[in-house]
Amino acid sequence: MFNRQQQFRTTRNSAGSSRSVDSLRGYTLMEVLVVMMIIGILLALIVPALGRLLGASKGVATRTTINQIDSIIQARYDAVLEADVSVEAKKLAALNSGVDEKEAEFLIRKLMYRQALPQRPEDLGGFDVDLSTTGDNPPLASAWTSKGGAAASDDSSVTGSELFLFALTQGSSVQVIPGGKSYPMPVLEMDNINQAHVQDSDGNGLDELIDDWGQPLRFYNFPTHLFRDDGDTGNAPTRKNASILIAGLPNDTNLNGPLDRDPLDPSGLLASQFSSADSNFEYTPGGSVVNRVAMSTFNYHIPSTYYVPLLVSAGPDGVLGLGEPTSTVTSPGPPQTADRLAKVESTSGATDIRDNITNRNTQQ
């Protein structure tokens, strides 16, 4: 019978064993090129898919942390709205002949809101929005500065995030009138927060919140420039840019509509004190320390304009597309005003904010 093995030529090595000549044949150049081409095609298909998968997982992780923090943001916001401030309002009105009880209540809630959800160091500065004059500062202010916290705004993207996290974890109460009533506030429990999103990047002993791309989360308590890019209350508000970052906004953008009023002054009581976006309404807290500050866009926000507390991640591109919350930019217009009220940067329009993740668009 024909032996199939005999159809192959054999060769012997030095040890005397034999093996097929065919088994010694290497790959041809063409075969190598074909294999390399196939590998290249597979990599071209797989790498982008892996990149998208990784980016999606970072987005999910960031959204989860933002949602967890948002629960405390909303709880604090509700606590400010629901607090009984009648006694403190009577005290403040009695100390200031030009302020009635309704106006005093508005001012008290405004300062409570700034303390409970601070964006910049000046938010802990009491009635005069100044940490350097300590007579009207709340207890949280001294706790913040004693830990090495900044006493004034700077252009760092970290300062605001440090302050915001400090207030949520250390500020268990707010106090408006020195020596007056303290109002309890919900506290953020850090045990359930992804520790990869907590970092002390500048080594000053104060942690900040970061997203999964390593960028600090930014917080805005009065992002009114999203609704009035020109800052003019005489013009109807807009929702074009705001709707990218804040879901569920009403479609009505008319004057006297829902976007044309301050959530803490829904009846417009204090709006009448403004003759323009930067006019003044001055008051004093009274007592042994007298402090005056303009109730202006510079010190507060664009009047008669809607806002929500807004926590923002710059998203996968790392570009915020908004003015920094603690900006000290001096041009154009009043220092800090437009940028720290979440003005969309004109150089990029809305392009850079489209991938931003916020506590109000986390379902997108």
Image (tube, helix red, strand yellow):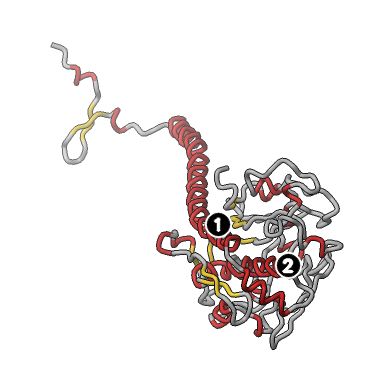
Q: Position of residue 71 (x, y in %)?
A: 51, 56
Q: Is residue 176 left or right of residue 238?
A: left
Nearer to the camera, 179 or 113: 179
Which mark lies nearer to you, 1 or 2?
A: 2
Residue type at mark 2 is: Glu
Mark 1 and 2 residues: CB-CB less than 8 Å, in contact?
Answer: no
Q: Looking at the image, which residue sits at the far bottom?
A: 288
Disc number for residue 115: none
The quadrant of the picture occupied by the C terminus is top right
Q: Position of residue 213 (x, y in %)?
A: 54, 56
* 278, above or below 260, in the image: below
Sequence-earlier tag: 1 or 2? 1
Residue for point 71% across, 66% down? 102
Secondary structure category for the residue under label 1? helix
Is residue 344 visible from the viewing direction of this image?
no
Residue for point 62% across, 77% down? 150
Q: Position of residue 19 (x, y in %)?
A: 22, 31
Secondary structure category for the residue under label 2? helix
Q: Looking at the image, which residue sits at the far left?
A: 1
Q: Position of residue 158 (x, y in %)?
A: 60, 68
Residue for point 81% across, 57% down? 231
Q: Is residue 361 left or right of residue 271?
A: left
Is residue 56 visible from the viewing direction of this image?
yes
Q: Is residue 265 left or right of residue 10?
A: right
Q: Residues within 10 Å of mark 2 (few under 14, many from 20)?
A: some
Q: Residues within 10 Å of mark 1 (few under 14, many from 20)?
A: some
Nearer to the camera, 4 or 9: 4
Residue type at mark 1 is: Gln
Identify residue for label 2.
Answer: 103
Identify residue for label 1.
Answer: 74
The quadrant of the picture occupied by the N terminus is top left
